[in-house]
Image: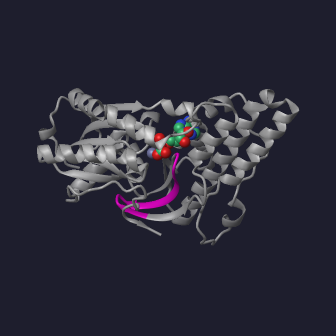
Amino acid sequence: MSDLLVLGIETSCDETSAAVLHGAHDLRSHVILSQDMHAVYGGVVPELAARAHLQVVDDVVGRALDDAGCMLAELDGIGVTAGPGLIGALLVGVCWAKAAAYASGVPVVGVHHMEAHLFAPHIEDPAAEPPFVALLVSGGHTLLLHATAWGEYRLLGRTRDDAAGEAFDKVARLLGLPYPGGAPLEALATEGDPARYSFPRPLLASSGKPGATEALDFSFSGLKTAVATQVAELEANGGLDAERAHVAASFQAAVNDVLATRAAQAVERTGTGRILVAGGVSANGALRRELRRRHPPEVELFHATPRLSVDNGAMVARTAAFRLLLGESSDLDLSADASLPFPGLRE
Ligand code: KG4
Ligand code: ZN
C-alpha cells in the first residue's frame, strides 16, 4: 500500500475519536474520548451523545493533528464514519469532516462503521488480511462474513434480535454492573463457575448439520430473558449476591459458545482457515480463548488489541485509505445514514 496520510474521525456512538494514520500501520496519533455520562442512564442517550460530540470534536481532532505534527492541508484524505450509528452523533463527525475538507481541499471519505471494525486488526498486524471468516461483534451489530478480499464480503449470518454486545450490556445491568457492561461482566465472570447455570444457546441446534445452507444467524434475546428469569428467582430467594459471579460466568459461556460455534461452522463452510474477530466484544479474552480452543493450531486467529477493538478513529482512517487507493471519495453532499448498507456485502 502506498503511504497515504489520512485523518480518521469516529462519532457514531459514545466515543469521540480521531487518529492520523500513515500507510496501513504507522499510527501517528490516536485520541479516544469516551462519554461517561451515559452510565447514569444505563445506556447511551442519543441526544446527549450528539451534544457531547459537538462539545469536544474540535479539540479531539485538533489534538490528533497536533500529536501527529501535521496540518489539515498535508493530509491525503479525511475519513469519517457516515453510518450506521446514532444519526445526531454521526452528523457531528460528518459535518466536521466536510467543513474541514471544504476548507483544505482534501478529499473526504464516508466510511461504514462495521467495515472499519473489520480493518482494525490490520493496523497492528499486516497478516490480518482477507481471505478470512469475520465475526463482527459490537454493541449494535453481530455479523458473520466471509471476506474474500478487502471490499468483497459475503454475509453468512447476522443477529435476528439483540447484538452480542447489547446482550452483555443488558445482563450486566441485571447484575447491577455499570454501563457499558461487557468489560465489568467479563471481570466478574472470572470469579464464577461457567457451568453452574445452563443457559440456552439459541438457534445452534438447527444449523450445524453437514451440508446445511441456511443462514448462520444469531439470536440473543431469549438468552437474555433466561438470565433475567434466573436473576429474578435468585433475588426472590435472597440468593443473588452469592450467585452473581456464577450467573455472569454462565451467561458469558453461553454467548461465547454460540459465537465460537458459528465461527467454526463458517470455517467449515467456506474452507477458510483464517478467522478475524472484531468489534467491542472481541475485547473479551474468554471469547478469544474459546475461539482458539475450538480450532487446531493451523487455523489462524486475528484480533486487535482492546484499544482498537472498541470504537476508534484509527480504523476509520485505515478504511478511508483503502477507499482512497481505489480512487473512491465522497462528494461534499455526503450525509450521515443511520442504517448505511455495508459496502460490498452480498447476501
Ligand atoms: O464496537 P463497540 O465499541 O461499539 C459499537 O459499535 O457498538 O462495541 C461496544 C460493545 C458494548 O456492548 C460493550 O459492552 C462491549 O462492546 N464490550 C465487551 C467487552 N468490552 C466491550 N463485551 C464483552 N467483553 C468485553 N471485554
Ligand atoms: Zn463499533
Depth check: give the residue in front, 178 or 156: 178
Residue drawn at (64%, 31%), measured in percent from left and top? Answer: 177
How was this image coloured? one colour
Residue drawn at (20%, 58%), measured in percent from left and top? Answer: 331
Residue 108, compared with residue 74, is above or below; it is below
The magenta stretch is 139-153
Relative horizontal placement of residue 19, taking residue 270 as reference (left or right): left
Looking at the image, can residue 344 be seen? yes
What x and y, as percent, mark residue 252?
67, 41
Relative horizontal placement of residue 223, taking residue 321 as reference (left or right): right
What x and y, as percent, mark residue 101?
17, 47
Q: Main secondary structure of the magenta part?
A: strand
What x and y, as percent, mark residue 51?
38, 37
Taking the magenta stretch, the answer to whether it contains residue 141 is yes
Residue drawn at (39%, 34%), measured in percent from left and top? Answer: 52
Q: Residue 231 occupies which quadrant of the picture?
A: top right
Relative horizontal placement of residue 64, taking residue 153 as reference (left or right): left
Residue 311, compared with residue 56, is above or below; it is below
Of all residues shown, which one is farthest toward the right?
Answer: 237
Taking the magenta stretch, the answer to whether it contains residue 174 is no
What x and y, as percent, mark residue 32?
37, 32
Looking at the image, can residue 291 be seen? no
Residue 26, compared with residue 337, is above or below; it is above
Depth check: give the residue in front, 231 or 265: 231
Please tell me how many numbered marks the rendered image carries.
0
Residue drawn at (56%, 30%), measured in percent from left and top? Answer: 40
